[in-house]
Image: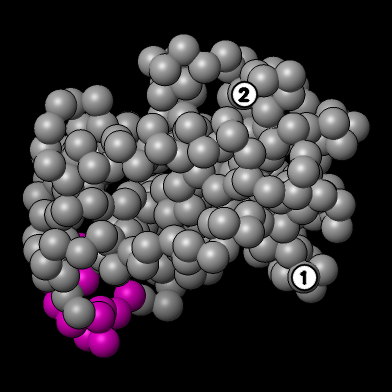
Amino acid sequence: MLVYLNGDYLPLEEARIPVLDRGFLFGDGVYEVIPAYGGRPFRLREHLQRLENSLRAIRMEPPLTQEQWAAVFRRLVEEHGGVDQQIYLQVTRGAYHKRLHAIPAKTRPTLFAMSNPLPPRDPELVARGLSVVVREDIRWQRCDIKAITLLANILAQQEARDAGADEALLVRDGEVTEGTASNFFMVKEGRILTPPKSNHLLPGITRDLVLELAREAGLPSAEMVVTPSDLATAEEIWITSSTKEVMPVTRLDGQAVGDGRPGPMWRRMDALYQACKARLRRQAGDECRG
Ligand code: PDD
């Protein structure tokens, strides 16, 4: 498999970075995960804008233009033919000659990207719905930055797995923020609700698209604070991400959500989302542009 590293395309096994890379030493970098359907990156502009926001937030300049990134992705995606894919890209602050917490005056960033097939969602899992547990959000105060530093997410995800669940919903100061690698939605009294954007959650590209699709379809939605006690009265719970799309959650801390099956509002939203992907594959309309 060919990957992109600092301007070169080379086999994955040959891609090497120095051990003094600050991504390796400090987790000093940011990343993106972008799905590609029918060879076309989904919501590319939004992902690249978020990458630029993440970079600026950690005091780095965008190392490539959006057009340059798009060219890199075209080359990587071509490798796998027309199958659905997930593009991963990571930018770190690069290597400095010694370990230093402060930002060195000048380093050359390390740019890495690869594309892997994105298998279709397991239809059985979609029909059954996911199981989630609630955990304390022990992450830092800048969860809006898509930082590669993911230890707290990893630990919470593992706690979910240890409890036999698929994902953990995180709670900070009495508010549900998001999942360990997903955003969070619930349906209450027929309204789609999700926490407002803040420094406590990632501004998910899928999250934004779900809100956009809800508005276009005339489905009532609102961005509002959700507390753990609201969860108990949810008619439906969903999680969203670029790789999971919109997934129904049917068990919360071992209890059924609603009637324990994916709900009618999820079915509508999932249909809208799938239609959006299909339009991109056919390159029809620009609503779900690449
Ligand atoms: N994660 N919140 C967190 C903490 C995430 O890591 C992600 C995605 C999301 C959803 O964002 P989006 O809809 O833009 O994918 C929310 C990616 C997929 C990952 O780490 O693999």
Amino acid carrying label 2: it is Ile
User: Is 267 on the left-hand or right-hand side of 252?
Assistant: left
User: Is 135 on the left-hand or right-hand side of 245?
Assistant: right
Residue drawn at (9%, 50%), measured in percent from left and top?
A: 71
Q: Which residues are magenta?
A: 3-17
Q: 79 or 31: which is nearer to us?
A: 79
Q: Is residue 5 magenta?
A: yes
Amino acid carrying label 1: it is Gly
Which quadrant does the C terminus fall into?
A: top left
Residue drawn at (17%, 45%), measured in percent from left and top?
A: 281
Q: Would you place residue 83 above or below residue 73 in this image?
A: below
Image position, residue 70 (x, y; %):
15, 46
Q: 121 or 157: which is nearer to us?
A: 121
Among numbered discs 1 and 2, the one appearing first in the sequence: 1
Check residue 192 in the rendering and tell me which mark sits there, or answer none.
2
Do the CB atoms of the residues marked 1 and 2 lie less than 8 Å apart? no
Image position, residue 243 (x, y; %):
43, 54
User: Is 278 on the left-hand or right-hand side of 133?
Assistant: left
Q: Is residue 24 magenta?
A: no
Q: Farthest residue in the bottom direction?
A: 13
Is residue 1 something one can see in this rendering?
yes
Q: 8 or 270: which is nearer to us?
A: 270
Image position, residue 87 (x, y; %):
29, 58
Label 1, label 2: how many angstroms apart (C-alpha)?
27 Å
Check residue 164 in the rendering and tell me which mark sits there, or answer none.
1
Image position, residue 163 (x, y; %):
82, 68
Residue drawn at (63%, 39%), measured in percent from left and top?
A: 263
Under circle 1, the secondary element is loop
Which quadrant does the N terminus fall into?
A: bottom left
User: Is 251 on the left-hand or right-hand side of 100?
Assistant: right
Under circle 2, the secondary element is strand
